[in-house]
Image: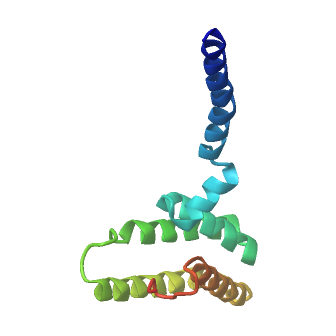
Amino acid sequence: MSLRRTLTPLALLGLLTFTLPACAQSQEASPQQRSAAGARGGDAASRVQAQVSSLSEAVNLTASQTAQIRELLEAEAADRPARGTGDRQAMREQMQARRAETTRKIEALLTPEQIPGFRTWQEAQRQNQRGRRGGRGNGRS
């Protein structure tokens, strides 16, 4: 009986020693995971920052262009309605119109040499978005 009393607490202690660190590791997010989460759908500021950084690398934006484009994308994000409210088709049309307007404004800020790179970047973003949705397109399965 005394052997059982001694081994049971030791076994529990050993079990906790190995499982608690494993649980803690799985809950911590690395900086890459956090930035990826922001790009995937985290807060609006993270998404805007990821877009601006990516676009800046793609077309070599000036500091002024970067600031102006960040403002445009932040305004678009702030104007975006909450999900699940209203008519989906009407929301989709509004979103497409806002996106087209933002694209027009961004192109107005770019030099003629940067516009083809911007359009290539946009297409890559669309393909990336489709890939994250599993190729479903338009959020439908």
**Nearer the observer, 115 or 87:** 87
On the rendered structure, is 47 left or right of 10? left
- In-front residue for pair 75/19: 19
Displayed quadrant of residue 33: bottom right
**Where 93 falls versus 36 (above or below)?**
below
Residue 101 at x, y = what percent?
Answer: 45, 85
Is residue 141 toward the left or the right of residue 23 in the image? left
Residue 36 image point, x, y percent: 63, 61
Residue 34 position in % (x across, y down) = 61, 53
* Quarter of image, res 59: bottom right
Identify which residue is drawn at 66% across, 24% down: 11
The residue shown at (38%, 71%) is 80
Q: Which residue lies furthest to the front in this view?
A: 1
As drawn, which residue projects farthest toward the left?
86
Q: In this view, does 3 lie above or below 57?
A: above
| Quadrant occupied by the N terminus | top right
Q: Quadrant of residue 27?
A: top right
* Residue at image location 25% in from the left, 83% down from the top: 87
83 displayed left or right of 51: left
